[in-house]
Image (tube, rainbow, N blue to C red):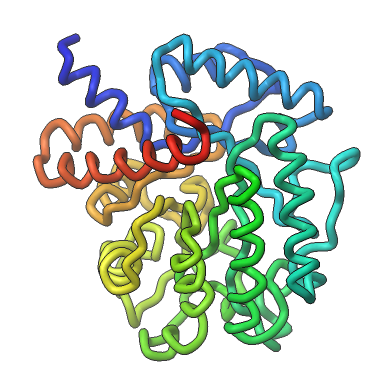
Amino acid sequence: MNRDDGTQMETAGQRLMLGFDGIDLNDDLRHIIRDLRAGGLILFKRNIETPDQVKALCESCRAYAKACGLPPLFIAVDQEGGTVARLREPFTLFKGNPYIETLEDARHFAAVTARELKSIGVNMNFAPVLDVAGDNEDSIMRDRAFKGNPERVAVLGTEVIRTFQENGILAVAKHFPGIGRTIKDSHFFLPELDIELPALEISDLIPFMAAKDEGVSGIMLSHILYPGLDEKWPASLSPSIAGNLLRDRIGYEGIVMTDDLDMKAIQKDIETCIRQILTSGIDMALICHKGPNIDKAYDEISRLLREEEALSALGKKSVERILRAKRKYIGY
């Protein structure tokens, strides 16, 4: 393998945030880290038994990545509080965003959560949710969103972001450009939200623009089709939404990532998904379950970066953003 091949391998791997089975450093994890050179790992309940166990898991993964000569791993979890909290007792259990009413509530939740995440070696939280559910009782996000209008969501959400990041945890705001109006679950369907940009700009986008101004480390794209913005591709695969809207119009310079590509809203083969992700300038692809898609995604990223100069140039910018965040928060 020549030096360019090695650089291409690492560039490809840094674009992946991967899930796995097991509670310790097993052969699958070694493959993900050593062979695929993954940029990040995501933990689920299936990976977590006790604080000591998950701490040992994170430490062993981090040490193994270092031994393989890799940049430090993002190690992420969904710890929103309420209905989405992968860490259960003895970790502190919060009721969730609908019950965060004041800035003090937001600071308390984020400070305690950040301290507990750091204690076990997790450095990234897929939170806060910045979707605006408002008074929509049918919203799929009614149990996960801050209550109130977009401005209130922005104020509480940015306080959570600020507190996470002041305490060394990378915050990831989700689900851009907003799914609070939807009623179908993208884990099982591809929801469609027929709304034009001007309406989004005075509502759903307000919290995300505030998060950008706060310097949020990452923004996660939704698996929702917005025909008024892109008639063909959901946000998580859309050059119009990830590139034109989030990067160019809003001016976001942090890490952009997909939601889980294993979700049933994504009805394309993984190779098509990867091409769209790279074309859109999306930095990281989430694949949260063990299976052939992980290796296929790595192979396709490697091939496209090797064979297509324009995607290779975009890829370099993505890896620069990823490594910049790692230097700032993980000490790479």
The residue lying at 81 percent from left, 23 percent from top is: 52
Find the residue positioned furthest to the front. Answer: 166
Where residue 207 appears, as percent x and y from the top left, is 53, 75
Depicted 285 relative to depicted 23: above or below: below
User: Residue 139, percent across and down?
Assistant: 66, 78
Q: Is residue 292 left or right of residue 318?
A: right
Between residue 115 and residue 11, name the one nearer to us: 115
Residue in the image at 42% along x and 54% along y: 267
For the N terminus, which image quadrant? top left
Residue 296 image-quadrant placement = top left
Q: Looking at the image, is 272 positioned above or below residue 133?
A: above
User: Can you say which quadrant of the picture contains the C terminus?
Assistant: top left
* Image quadrant in which you'd find residue 179: bottom right
Question: Where's residue 68, x and y in %?
Answer: 43, 12
Q: In the figure, 326 relative to 179: above or below? A: above
Question: Which picture quadrant has residue 12?
Answer: top left
**Closest to the observer, 60 or 303:** 60
Q: Is residue 151 left or right of residue 281?
A: right
- The structure residue drawn at horizontal position 64% and vertical position 35%, both measured from the top left corner, is 122
What number of labels is visible?
0
- Where residue 173 sits: x, y (%)? 54, 60
* Residue beneath the point at 34% across and 82% down: 228
- Using the image as rendered, state which of residue 292 and residue 258 is in the foreground: 258
